[in-house]
Image (cartoon, helix red, strand yellow):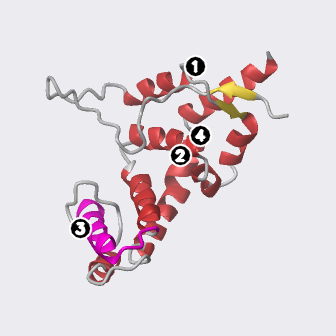
Amino acid sequence: MPSLVSLPSLELPLFNMETDDKKTGRCRTGNLKSRLQAKLLQATNTEGLCLEEMAQWSQSLERLLSSKCGMKIFQAFLKSEFSDENLEFWVVCEDYKKIRSSFRMSSRAKKIFKLYIQAEAPREINIDHKTRELIQTNIKVPSAVCFDDAQKLVYGLMEKDSYPRFLKSDIYRTLVDSTSDSMRM
């Protein structure tokens, strides 16, 4: 039977983590990485996380993203590195592919383009000019695959860059170590 460890409450909704203090208007990032680690280590959640599941996260990015908890922790890591737009875009594309209404698909495609694809977009992802132009053409007659090229590029960037850094990060290592320590008790 897998051993369980209490998973800390992140209290950080997926893809809605703000760092600005609305009262003062100042950015309160401080040492965001340390704050995220502290959140991860606070044992306040009743959900259990088994070491076996966490071990699977190190096997592939696909395994990490297939875990709801893994995705949240990866998002927290990306947020600490100010690169969470890549994961956010990837998830938005996965949701976009599930849309069946052509009107809704058209509306959502335009929003995705404005938020992530167009030059100087608020959450602009790092893609080449050719892919950007292809998407601009594709969304004129949107389909479930019109963002596939950009999504593959972003996945590749995460897989080759962010994901290996995540596996070496203090956030992941501390979580694995705390899980291993709790199993020894």
Q: Position of residue 122 (x, y in %)?
A: 22, 54
Contact, mark 2 vs mark 1 (Cβ under 8 Å): no
Image quarter of residue 86: bottom left
Contact, mark 1 vs mark 4 (Cβ under 8 Å): no
Q: Position of residue 102 (x, y in %)?
A: 33, 77
Vertical comparison of 33 with 87: above or below: above
Q: Residue shown at 26%/59% (left/top)?
A: 115
How would you rate the neighbour count of disc 1 (Cα within 10 Å): few for under 14, some for 14-19, many for 20 or more? some
Image quarter of residue 46: top right
- Quickly name the residue at label 3: 118
Q: Nearer the viewer, residue 84 or 7?
A: 7
Q: What distance separates the C-alpha of mark 4 from that of mark 3?
A: 32 Å
- Quickly name the residue at label 4: 168
| Of the two numbered discs 1 and 4 in the rendering, the one whose residue sits closer to the viewer | 1
Vertical comparison of 105 with 4: above or below: below
**Mark 3: amino acid:** Gln
Q: Residue shown at 71%/42% (left/top)?
A: 53
Contact, mark 1 vs mark 3 (Cβ under 8 Å): no
In what element is the residue under mark 2? helix
Instruction: Indicate left or right for 89 with 164 as reference.
Output: left
Q: Nearer the viewer, residue 150 or 46?
A: 46
The answer, for residue 108, to whether it is visible in the render is yes
Sequence-wise, which precedes: disc 4 or disc 3? 3
Q: Residue shown at 46%/43% (left/top)?
A: 75
**Mark 4: amino acid:** Lys
Q: Position of residue 9 (x, y in %)?
A: 51, 27
Q: Which image quadrant: the C terminus? A: top right
- Quickly name the residue at label 1: 43
Instruction: Indicate left or right for 81 with 62 as reference.
Output: left
